[in-house]
Amino acid sequence: MYGRRRIGKSTLLRHWAEQSGVPFTYWSAEKEPAPVQRRKLFARITNADPGGIGSPAFTSWSDLWQAVNPAFQAQYRILVIDEVPFAADADPAMLSAL
């Protein structure tokens, strides 16, 4: 979903995901380096500590998607990624990997 800032897109998506009855993961990108974003998204999807010992450092978005693929194949779920422009600004390859 794309549109002007501060009109309720995030709230609408969260409400829709909650009402769907399907497990979902909500993650909001921040203005930070892409490796940090990838580590935080992986942690959110897997319910891990993003700064924990052994926390994977993904060298690309493609590596992240390959790592989380089994979680999405094991159980149908919704992934809501908010503030996508922040992730794309940090690494333009994010959109093509997605």
Image (cartoon, rainbow, N blue to C red):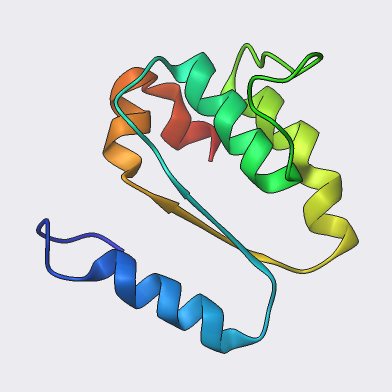
Judge left or right: residue 71 versus residue 40: right
Q: How many marks?
A: 0
Foreground: 47 or 95?
47
Residue 44 quadrant: top right
Residue depicted at x 53% and y 41%: 98
Up-down: is 26 above or below 84? below
Residue 59 quadrant: top right
Residue depicted at x 24% and y 59%: 2
Q: Residue 56 placed where, x, y %?
A: 74, 18
Q: Residue 61 placed where, x, y %?
A: 58, 26
Foreground: 52 or 35?
52
Judge left or right: residue 43 versus residue 71: left
Residue 78 quadrant: bottom right
Up-down: is 59 above or below 37? above
Foreground: 64 or 40?
40
Residue depicted at x 84% and y 65%: 75
Q: Residue 40 placed where, x, y %?
A: 56, 31
Judge left or right: residue 58 versus residue 1: right
Judge left or right: residue 71 versus residue 35: right
Residue depicted at x 37% and y 31%: 87
